[in-house]
Image (spheres, rainbow, N blue to C red):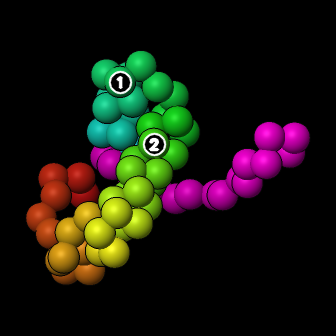
């Protein structure tokens, strides 16, 4: 890959995929671009304050995606 990007296979459920795809469309990004943007923001936040975006990141949360 000439641009230094790595390919990563990703398996997500259909409802999460649909929500991410809609969000990407709202933000005028490809789905891949949206996922990369979100991951970049999470890493940036972690570097900023040494913590993940949420103190409860590992706790199960209720999402209407299943």
For disc 1, the marked residue is: 27
Tell me what residue is drawn at x 52 percent, y 36 percent.
Answer: 33
* Looking at the image, residue 58 lies above or below residue 38: below
Q: Work out whether residue 37 or residue 62 is closer to the camera in this orientation and state it.
A: 37
- The residues tagged by marks 1 and 2 sit, at their Cα atoms, a distance apart of 11 Å
For disc 2, the marked residue is: 37
Helix, strand or loop at label 1? It is: loop
Tell me what residue is drawn at x 56 percent, y 57 percent.
Answer: 10
Of the image marks 1 and 2, the number of the one nearer the N terminus = 1
The percent coordinates of residue 17 (x first, y second) are 39, 44
Q: Is residue 60 visible?
A: no
Quadrant of the snapshot with the C terminus: bottom left
How many tags in the picture?
Answer: 2
Residue count near mark 1 (Cα–Cα under 10 Å), binned few <14, some 14–19, many ≥20: few
* Looking at the image, residue 2 lies above or below residue 6: above
Tell me what residue is drawn at x 73 percent, y 48 percent.
Answer: 5
The range drawn in magenta is 1-16
Quadrant assignment, res 28: top left
Tell me what residue is drawn at x 39 percent, y 50 percent.
Answer: 41
């Amino acid at each position: 890959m000439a641009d230094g990007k790595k390919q990563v296979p990703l398996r997500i459920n259909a409802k999460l995929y649909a929500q991410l795809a809609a969000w990407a469309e709202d933000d005028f990004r490809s789905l891949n671009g949206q996922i990369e943007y979100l991951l970049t923001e999470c890493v940036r936040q972690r570097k900023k304050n040494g913590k993940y975006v949420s103190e409860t990141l590992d706790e199960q949360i209720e999402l209407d995606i299943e």
